[in-house]
Image: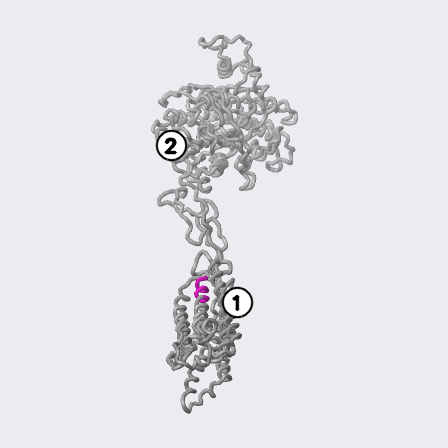
């Protein structure tokens, strides 16, 4: 019985107790409106705060927030405007309304507490059997910074409450395991960092500095940039990081690094708070002339106009989300009045700030009282300016994304739903995970034609505008859109520049140069410097026979065998060809002497023919003389085949014609020498030798000697004839066109046979030089053979050592010298007698004892 009483008492006590009770004091939102579905918002209407040191003995006092942040308040008004617009639109969430709870939080602690309040609700007691009917927000919008967003997204993400940020860009937030319910309407820093690397590469800046703040946003963003920059062959001279609330030595270290660095371009991945501190310190130390490349967290922040060193940021480049127009937003902003938000202290503070007056509800006695006629209708300020909406448009899209997700949820048809057995969500008891499911799959187009979707990580498609900070004063900031970046396009077409004039760092209109080493021009190649980054190198000329036809070439290319580098070393040009030409001076001179020799030989032949009946002509076998003159004329003329560009026929003709004509010539001289010796033997008593070497035998001997040379030439041409050859071994920069011998044995056999006959002729003439005859032709033959042998003996080393066309010239000279030697020594003395001493051209004189004539 006692046990039953105790059980009954316990049931009574349990029935009288609530299930859920709010722990601690509630924190009311700054701006609120009731609705069927509540959207939470977390913004920081004030920047900077003064906090107290926690003792962990009492609850900490809330921080004292400082400066008004108009941009954040404008974000909240864009959220309110979007909710108002949706509630008036019958096509979205019919028969349902959206409400909002917007918190004004500064400091990490307050921001996280605001998020927890939105997740758990503000009711102190929930008198229900469970806690499922707490006034939990369907989604939370915010924050503008990555670090606070990561702080509360980790917490409320465990309850699967969607978090949508319009400005948190840290790539780390794309981690679905750590942030399972996070979405954003701004692209991830992963794309921004890669776009910044492409930007730096586009302007040829290969030597840059990198600075970030010491939080996950800055560290992760700059890490991705450095990795992407290395892929784009951009070198990082230094990387430094500091935090606004960190030690002063960190900022000093950054400033000193910038001051003594050689790079002129700095990529700053940080918030507006850090960049203002850094700019102020650099301005104070007069460190100017730098080109800043900034992240979207500060590049368009209007609060830059308040910083002391804003002038050094003029010319900054950076990527921001595309701008858009929101019809009706300006009218909504201008209709703002404290009476619309009677419980908001910040709205009153904002009103006093805008009109520099004091409302009755405040105790600010330093300002004149507001007269009640104040209105934003005619006020031109950053708050009412809707001409360049970027991040504000992201807030607008975030609200619509949640609205479309809720619309899909409430319009679900039972049996066709996405949950178990085709079920739909209970619209009276909507669970956060159900909203999360619909939000993940939301797809819609805004009234401005912008497509809104999320990938599996909650990220939108990445598209940026490249802006240039062209003018900054204490009140205004002018930016110009100079390019676009669209990550959805092919790799080579993602970055496009507009035809807009850019203002560079320091207000210059000249693109700054930031390289470790100047570019290597074509004709040179890069050689890395030891123990330095790849962007630091020396430029050395290409090796002989190699070129580089692009700037900053890593290696040189070898020219084809028929080509050679030009003087700049950036192009292969066809090698110049060299051969003995009729058009050059040497060719003209040699041709002249060839023709002169032939003409002189013809003239002597005419003289001999005219005086053929005279004793001096008849005494020396006139037939052999005419044959010798004919062969000499051929010798002179065959020299012409050595001049001009070699061809198959000219190569075969020049050597064979030379060999045969010279053998014919030497054979005639040899026949004349033998005739002299035989004539002397015939004068001896009892000698009958002349009958063995008469005119017929003389002609036959010439024919036999010449026939042997003809056989040698035929064998040479048959086995391995001479052929045109491009000699590239002697000169590297030009080609020598010459006739290759084909068979060297054939060539030296031809020359050897000529030499053998010449030596034999010289030996016989030498024996007959002192024979007792009034006109001893053997003496002249001896002199001619002496000249012939001397010329061809010296020809051999000269021929072997002479380069290119000089080889041919030496060969022609040898032919001409030996031909002229034979002509002058054998025939000129006779012509002298015939033409100038006709009295000596008698039989009596030839038989007399007169003085001999010498060559």
The kind of secondary structure element at disc 2 is helix
Assign the C terminus to one quadrant of the image.
Answer: bottom left
Figure quadrant of residue 832: bottom left
Tell me the number on the disc at residue 344.
none
Q: Is residue 719 above or below residue 221?
A: below
Magenta segment = 805-812
Distance CA(mark 2)–CA(mark 1): 75 Å
Q: Which residue is mark 2?
A: 258
Mark 2 / mark 1, whichever is N-terminal: 2
Q: Where is residue 764 shown, x and y percent of the image?
A: 40, 80
Residue farthest along the left direction in this orientation: 249
* Scheme of colours in the image: one colour
Q: Where is residue 588 shown, x and y percent of the image?
A: 49, 60
Q: Is residue 764 above or below residue 246?
A: below
Say which of 339 and 820 sits in front. 820
Residue farthest along the front direction in this orientation: 839
Q: Residue at x 43, y 61 (%)?
A: 729
Say which of 302 and 426 sits in front. 302
Q: Is residue 520 left or right of residue 140?
A: left
Say which of 36 and 181 sits in front. 181
Q: Where is residue 804 shown, x and y percent of the image?
A: 45, 61
Q: Which residue is mark 1?
A: 650
């Amino acid at each position: 019985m006692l046990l039953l009483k105790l059980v009954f008492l316990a049931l009574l006590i349990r029935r009288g107790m609530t299930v859920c009770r709010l722990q601690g004091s509630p924190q009311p939102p700054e701006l609120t409106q009731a609705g069927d579905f509540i959207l939470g918002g977390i913004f920081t209407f004030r920047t900077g705060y003064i906090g107290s040191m926690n003792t962990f003995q009492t609850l900490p006092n809330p921080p004292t927030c400082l400066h008004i942040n108009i941009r954040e308040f404008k974000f909240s008004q864009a959220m309110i405007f979007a909710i108002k617009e949706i509630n008036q639109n019958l096509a979205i969430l019919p028969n349902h309304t959206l409400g909002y709870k917007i918190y004004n939080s500064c400091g990490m602690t307050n921001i996280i507490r605001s998020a927890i309040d939105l997740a758990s609700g503000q009711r102190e007691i929930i008198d229900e059997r469970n806690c499922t009917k707490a006034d939990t927000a369907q989604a939370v919008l915010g924050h503008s910074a990555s670090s606070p967003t990561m702080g509360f997204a980790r917490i409320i993400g465990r309850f699967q409450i969607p978090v949508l940020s319009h400005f948190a860009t840290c790539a780390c937030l794309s981690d679905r395991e750590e942030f399972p319910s996070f979405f954003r309407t701004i692209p991830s820093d992963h794309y921004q960092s890669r776009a910044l690397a492409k930007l730096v590469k586009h302007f040829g800046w290969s030597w840059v500095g990198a600075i970030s703040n010491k939080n996950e946003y800055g560290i992760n963003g700059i890490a991705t940039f450095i990795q992407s920059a290395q892929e784009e062959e951009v070198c990082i001279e230094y990387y430094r990081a500091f935090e606004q609330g960190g030690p002063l030595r960190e900022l000093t270290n950054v400033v000193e690094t910038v001051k003594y660095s050689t790079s002129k371009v700095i990529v700053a991945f940080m918030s507006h708070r850090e960049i203002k501190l850094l700019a102020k310190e650099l301005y104070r130390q007069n460190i100017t002339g730098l080109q800043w490349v900034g992240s979207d967290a500060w590049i368009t922040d209007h609060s830059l106009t308040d910083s002391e060193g804003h002038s050094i940021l003029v010319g900054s480049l950076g990527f921001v989300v595309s701008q858009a127009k929101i019809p009706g937003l300006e009218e909504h902003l201008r209709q703002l009045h404290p009476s619309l938000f009677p419980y908001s202290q910040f709205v009153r503070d904002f009103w006093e700030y805008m009109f520099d007056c004091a409302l009755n509800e405040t105790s600010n006695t330093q300002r004149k009282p507001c007269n009640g006629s104040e209105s934003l209708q005619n006020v031109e300020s950053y708050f009412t300016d809707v001409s360049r909406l970027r991040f504000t448009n992201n807030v607008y899209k975030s609200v619509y994304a949640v609205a479309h997700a809720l619309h899909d949820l409430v319009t679900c048809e039972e049996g066709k739903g996405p949950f178990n057995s085709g079920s739909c969500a209970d619209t009276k008891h909507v669970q956060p995970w159900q909203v999360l499911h619909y939000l993940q799959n939301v797809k819609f187009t805004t009234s401005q034609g912008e497509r809104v979707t999320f990938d599996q990580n909650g990220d939108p498609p990445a598209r940026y505008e490249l802006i240039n900070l062209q003018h900054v004063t204490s009140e205004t900031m002018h930016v110009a859109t100079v390019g676009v970046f669209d990550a959805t396009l092919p790799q080579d077409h993602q970055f496009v520049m507009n035809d807009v004039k850019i203002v560079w760092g320091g207000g210059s209109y000249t693109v700054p140069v930031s390289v470790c080493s100047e570019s290597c021009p074509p004709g040179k190649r890069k050689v890395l410097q030891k123990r330095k980054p790849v962007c630091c190198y020396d430029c050395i000329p290409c090796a002989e026979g190699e070129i580089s036809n692009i700037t900053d070439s890593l290696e040189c290319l070898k020219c084809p065998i028929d080509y050679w580098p030009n003087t700049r070393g950036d192009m292969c040009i066809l090698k110049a060809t060299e051969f003995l030409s009729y058009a050059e001076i040497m060719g003209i001179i040699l041709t002249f002497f060839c023709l002169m020799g032939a003409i002189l030989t013809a003239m002597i032949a005419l003289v001999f023919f005219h005086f053929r009946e005279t004793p001096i002509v008849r005494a020396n076998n006139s037939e052999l003389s005419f044959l010798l003159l004919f062969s000499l004329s051929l010798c002179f003329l065959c020299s012409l085949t050595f001049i001009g560009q070699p061809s198959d026929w000219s190569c075969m003709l020049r050597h064979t014609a030379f060999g045969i004509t010279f053998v014919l010539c030497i054979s005639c001289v040899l026949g004349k020498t033998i005739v002299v010796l035989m004539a002397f033997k015939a004068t001896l008593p009892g000698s009958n030798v002349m009958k063995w070497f008469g005119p017929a035998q003389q002609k036959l001997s010439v024919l036999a000697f010449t026939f042997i040379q003809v056989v040698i030439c035929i064998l040479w041409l048959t086995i391995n004839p001479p052929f045109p050859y491009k000699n590239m071994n002697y000169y590297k920069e030009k080609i020598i066109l010459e006739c290759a011998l084909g068979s060297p044995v054939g060539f030296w056999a031809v020359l050897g046979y000529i030499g053998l006959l010449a030596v034999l002729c010289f030996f016989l003439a030498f024996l007959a030089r002192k024979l007792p005859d009034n006109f001893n032709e053997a003496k002249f033959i001896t002199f001619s053979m002496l000249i012939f042998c001397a010329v061809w003996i010296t020809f051999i080393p000269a021929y072997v050592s002479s380069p290119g066309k000089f080889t041919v010239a030496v060969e022609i000279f040898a032919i001409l010298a030996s031909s002229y030697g034979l002509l002058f020594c054998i025939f000129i003395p006779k012509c002298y007698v015939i033409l100038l001493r006709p009295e000596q051209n008698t039989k009596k004189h030839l038989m007399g004892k007169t003085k001999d004539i010498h060559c």
